[in-house]
Image (spheres, grey):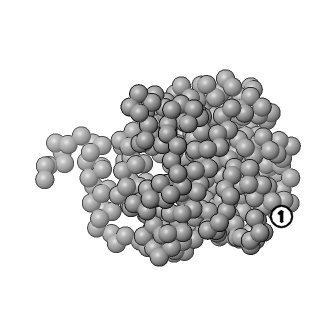
């Protein structure tokens, strides 16, 4: 092996983190992420949805000195409530009550075998959770797939949405309309069954972080990979296949001009996320996922939207540079 001093810094960090990941035993978690500890106590909201009883896991963290406002944080497809850990600390420290659900089909929530996933349904589930907590109005913050959900929530429940904040949301373009081929749920499922710790890490490093990697990202790879490594892997893969179909077939971008609440977009410029890019023709794959252009186009489409750009960050600015992201988030809230 070459001397690390002769290597580029990014490669040295990547090799070191990979070696560390291989040295530590790989975790195995349950289908509902049993065994992985969240940074705050997990509560459960029981609901009947689509003729079946379900459970929605969530965090509800009170501030030391309340300012009377509530922020709801919505996770992405490859993320969970725990991924918002640094943002939760910053928000509660500034006086905000923070509610962070795991959506049905994800993380510590139920994974029904038969469920018609839609952003409208997930928004309704979220609204039911907030109603059970006597929260009439809140700031809705959505990251990645959670950004698509947050936009749908603001469209569906404008009176309950104080502000809308989108953090590198996917769905800023309609991939099918751009030329990405449709893929069946069975094909999505076959793809999900191949998921491993290494495939999760490789995807996130390439697409989310512009080829760079930090050791602190590894905990989130282990969080996701542990579910795929456990006995509940089939239920996890099936839920992910169904929600992949939801993401691809239910664009919200065409309704951006109808969003009637104050909106801020936080866009890491290094992001290149685009669903179905692996099936797209080369000329389409090269064009889609251009977040610098997509962020500006979305800000122009949403009435009076504000755009915050992070020139050197990727898909998850709240993970990549928590201090800078949290400062920008709190400023937007003020």
Packing grade of label 1 (10 A; few <14, some 14-19, many >=20) is: few
* Residue 325, picture quadrant: top right
257 sits to left or right of 80 = right
Query: How many numbered marks does the figure carry?
Result: 1
Q: Quick one: 25 or 6, which is closer to the camera? A: 25
Which residue position is annotated with label 1?
132
Q: Is residue 142 left or right of residue 202?
A: right
When the figure is inspected, residue 30 is found, relative to residue 6, above or below; the finding is: below
Q: Secondary structure at mark 1?
A: helix
Q: Residue at x 78, y 61 (%)?
A: 129
Residue 105 coordinates in the image, percent (x, y): 62, 62
Do we see residue 269 in this rendering? no
Give the percent coordinates (x, y) of residue 123. Answer: 74, 52
In the displayed structure, 259 sits above or below 124; it is above
* Of residues 54 and 241, the one drawn nearer to the viewer in this rendering: 241
The residue at 65%/27% (across/down) is 299
Query: Residue 167 location in percent, x, y?
Result: 60, 41
Would you identify the image quadrant in which residue 7 lies?
top left
Q: Could you tell me which residue is drawn at 38 percent across and 31 percent down?
A: 282
Q: Residue at x 72, y 33 (%)?
A: 255
The picture quadrant where one finds residue 47 is: bottom right
Q: Is residue 318 visible?
A: yes
**Quadrant of the rendering where the C terminus is positioned:** top right
Relative to residue 55, is residue 312 drawn left or right?
left
In the rendering, at what x and y percent does residue 114 appear?
Answer: 65, 66
């Amino acid at each position: 092996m070459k001397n690390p001093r002769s290597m580029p810094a990014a490669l040295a960090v990547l090799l070191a983190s990979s070696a560390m990941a291989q040295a530590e035993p790989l975790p195995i978690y349950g289908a509902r992420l049993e065994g992985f500890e969240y940074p705050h106590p997990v509560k459960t909201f029981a609901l009947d949805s689509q003729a079946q009883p379900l459970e929605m896991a969530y965090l509800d963290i009170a501030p030391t000195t309340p300012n009377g406002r509530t922020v709801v944080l919505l996770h992405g497809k490859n993320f969970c409530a725990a991924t918002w850990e640094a943002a939760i600390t910053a928000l509660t420290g500034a006086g905000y009550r923070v509610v962070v659900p795991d959506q049905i089909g994800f993380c510590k929530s139920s994974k029904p075998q038969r469920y018609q996933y839609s952003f409208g349904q997930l928004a309704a589930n979220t609204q039911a959770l907030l109603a059970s907590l006597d929260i009439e109005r809140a700031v809705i913050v959505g990251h990645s797939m959670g950004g698509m959900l947050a936009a749908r929530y603001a469209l569906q429940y404008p009176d309950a949405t104080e502000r809308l904040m989108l953090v590198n949301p996917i769905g800023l373009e309609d991939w099918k309309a751009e030329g990405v081929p449709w893929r069946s749920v069975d094909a999505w499922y076959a793809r999900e069954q191949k998921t491993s710790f290494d495939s999760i890490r490789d995807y996130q490093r390439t697409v989310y972080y512009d080829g760079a990697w930090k050791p602190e990202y590894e905990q989130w790879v282990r969080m996701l990979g542990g579910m795929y490594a456990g006995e509940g892997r089939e239920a996890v893969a099936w839920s992910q296949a169904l929600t992949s179909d939801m993401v691809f077939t239910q664009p919200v971008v065409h309704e951006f001009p109808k969003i009637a609440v104050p909106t801020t977009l936080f866009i890491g410029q290094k992001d290149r996320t685009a669903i179905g890019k692996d099936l797209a023709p080369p000329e389409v794959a090269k064009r889609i996922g251009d977040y610098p252009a997509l962020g500006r186009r979305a800000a122009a489409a949403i009435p009076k939207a504000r755009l915050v750009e992070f020139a050197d960050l990727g898909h998850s600015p709240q993970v990549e540079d928590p201090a800078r992201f949290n400062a920008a988030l709190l400023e937007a809230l003020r």
